[in-house]
Image: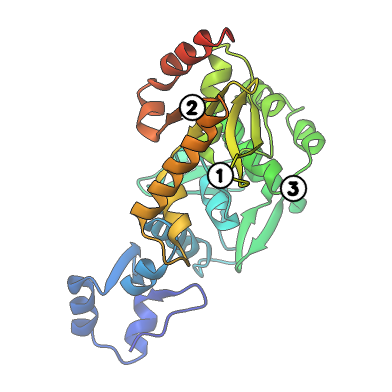
Amino acid sequence: MWLPDEHGLLRRHDVLDSGVTQRELEAAITSGELVLVSRGVYLQESRISASSRYRGDVLYRAKCLAVGSAKQGARPALLSHDSAAVIHGLPVLLPTRTRVHRFAERPHGGNAKERKTVFHTGTVPDEDIVEVDGVRVTGLARTVVDLAVTGPFHRALAAFDAGLARGLDRDELAERLGVRRKGVGTARFALRHASPLADNPGESWCRAQVIEAGLPIPALQVRYDLRDGSIAYVDLDFDGQVVVEFDGLTKYRQATIGSKRSPEEVVIEEKLREDKLRELGLDMVRTVWQELRDAAFIPVLTDHLGRRGLC
């Protein structure tokens, strides 16, 4: 019945042209079979539930694809910032999923916000425009820098961590920060501390809070050979004495994808891994998203570091 386009999207005029009646379309929307992602654009619920991504990420990516692939005028939209990042598959710390970011491609003026769109003004050179999945977006390096200069330190650090992990060159990023602009000072500071070893935005936020608190800078993804012969890598390592593990829900969800293990089994395995690390004399600190939001992580970490004489 449904004939989605190459992005998996269903546009109202195409659906009606295919022979589906207005009543059938409305019934599918009411029942939840189709989900509205943008004006007159829908996504099948089955596609959302079958995806390994979070529902919000799937819907936001679909919204950006709908805007970026819309046939409006001679030149299609140029997506940027969070919207370009989701098309690139670049993880973003605390992403905004309510508005689509795009360039108005005018040389002057500030950013203009509409209810569902943020228009960024300015010029984008041709070499900073790429096509991904048939949609025009700012290139990866430009996207990372745009995210960094428009966000606070923790968002900037996460953007650079993710960019370096994708193979971007640190010197090229630094060169792009050579131009005087709002937010560039924070971005430069973040780039100095950025690392391709950060495994996800949550780990980046942990490290950002450590840096801002003036605590010792940890090593990342340090390997430990456990007594049972297995190997463990820890997220943050302070002088081989205190280690930090960030427990985002994504870790446990990804561990079950393509596996017969239940989430409960994954949690038990993680607890056993933690016990084996403690057997080596390591002091373990675990933290989660809510503790980072509530500024509860640093006081706990400071206490553990103080007990080991590390701060």
> Is residue 27 shown left or right of residue 217?
left
Q: Residue at x 74, y 47 (%)?
A: 167
User: Looking at numbered disc 3 in the image, what kind of residue is underneath it?
Assistant: Gly
Outermost residue to the bottom: 19
Quick check: marks 1 and 3 in contact, CB under 8 Å? Answer: no
Tell me which corner region of the image, top left, top right, bottom left or bottom right, holds residue 13: bottom left
> Is residue 137 shown left or right of residue 115?
right
Work out whether 45 lies above or below 91.
below
Q: In terms of depth relative to the viewer, which is nearer, 212 or 85?
A: 212
Q: In terms of depth relative to the viewer, which is nearer, 301 or 110?
A: 301
Label 2 or label 1, whichever lies nearer to me, is: 2
Viewport quadrant of the N terminus: bottom left
Confirm whether residue 204 shows in the render.
yes
User: What residue does disc 1 label?
Assistant: 81
**First along the sequence among labels 2 and 3:** 3
Q: In terms of depth relative to the viewer, which is nearer, 286 or 277?
A: 277
Confirm whether residue 111 shows in the render.
no
Work out whether 34 lies above or below 288.
below
Viewport quadrant of the C terminus: top right
x%, y% of residue 45?
31, 71
Q: Residue at x 51, y 21 (%)?
A: 209
Q: Which mark is residue 284?
A: 2
Q: Which mark is residue 145?
A: none
User: Looking at numbered disc 1 in the image, what kind of residue is underneath it?
Assistant: His
x%, y% of residue 198?
62, 38
User: Looking at numbered disc 2 in the image, what kind of residue is underneath it?
Assistant: Met
The 10 Å Cα crowd at callout 2, few under 14, some 14 to 19, many 20 or more, is: some
> Is residue 117 shown left or right of residue 150?
left
Q: Residue at x 21, y 84 (%)?
A: 24
